[in-house]
Amino acid sequence: MNFLVFLQAQTGATGGSYSFLIMMGLIFVVMYFFMIRPQQKKQKELARFRSSLQKGDKVITAGGIYGVISEVKESYVLIEVDSNVKLRVDKSSIVKDSSDIQAGTR
């Protein structure tokens, strides 16, 4: 008998906890669609860009160095930044294609 009274008291209090759980679930869903999913999409796009690098592509590194790719290897690329000046840069540090940047700013 005491056990039934205990269960009835708990089920009466769970009405508020259900709304709390629903609210927490909605917050998680909103955070997923506005924060986590776009970041994952951006990371996949960047990985696709890095895997498609070719000789002659104009790129920008994470450090802000503009250059033209002169050689592509498995984990690094050689970037020509000036005539006869080449830098060996890890592929993960290449962040942007600079061919869409206005001419004259290099």
Image: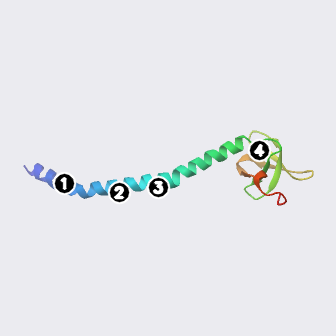
Q: Residue 10 carries which label?
A: 1
How busy is the neighbourhood of tag 2: few (under 14 within 10 Å), some, or many (20 plus)?
few
Of the two numbered discs 2 and 4 on the same chain, state the one appearing first in sequence.
2
Q: Residue 23 carries which label?
A: 2
Q: In the drawing, does residue 42 fall left or right of residue 60? A: left
Residue 31 percent coordinates (x, y):
47, 55
Give the label, 1 or 2, closer to the camera: 2
Give the label, 3 or 1, closer to the camera: 3
Q: Name the residue under label 4.
A: 76
- Describe the element under mark 3 as helix, strand or loop: helix
- Describe the element under mark 4 as helix, strand or loop: strand
Of the two numbered discs 4 and 1 on the same chain, state the one appearing first in sequence.
1
Of the two numbered discs 3 and 1 on the same chain, state the one appearing first in sequence.
1
How busy is the neighbourhood of tag 3: few (under 14 within 10 Å), some, or many (20 plus)?
few
| Residue occupying image coordinates x 33% and y 54% | 22
| Residue occupying image coordinates x 72% and y 56% | 62
Of the two numbered discs 1 and 2 on the same chain, state the one appearing first in sequence.
1
Of the two numbered discs 3 and 4 on the same chain, state the one appearing first in sequence.
3
The kind of residue on which mark 2 rests is: Met
Q: How many numbered callouts?
A: 4
| Residue occupying image coordinates x 31% and y 57% | 20
- Describe the element under mark 1 as helix, strand or loop: helix
Of the two numbered discs 2 and 3 on the same chain, state the one appearing first in sequence.
2
Q: Mark 3 points at which residue?
A: 31
Q: Which mark is residue 97?
A: none
How far apart in space, not on screen, are marks 4 and 1 (Cα)?
Answer: 62 Å
> Mark 3 near mark 1, Cβ–Cβ under 8 Å?
no
How far apart in space, not on screen, are marks 2 and 4 (Cα)?
Answer: 47 Å
Q: Which residue lies most toward the left here?
A: 1
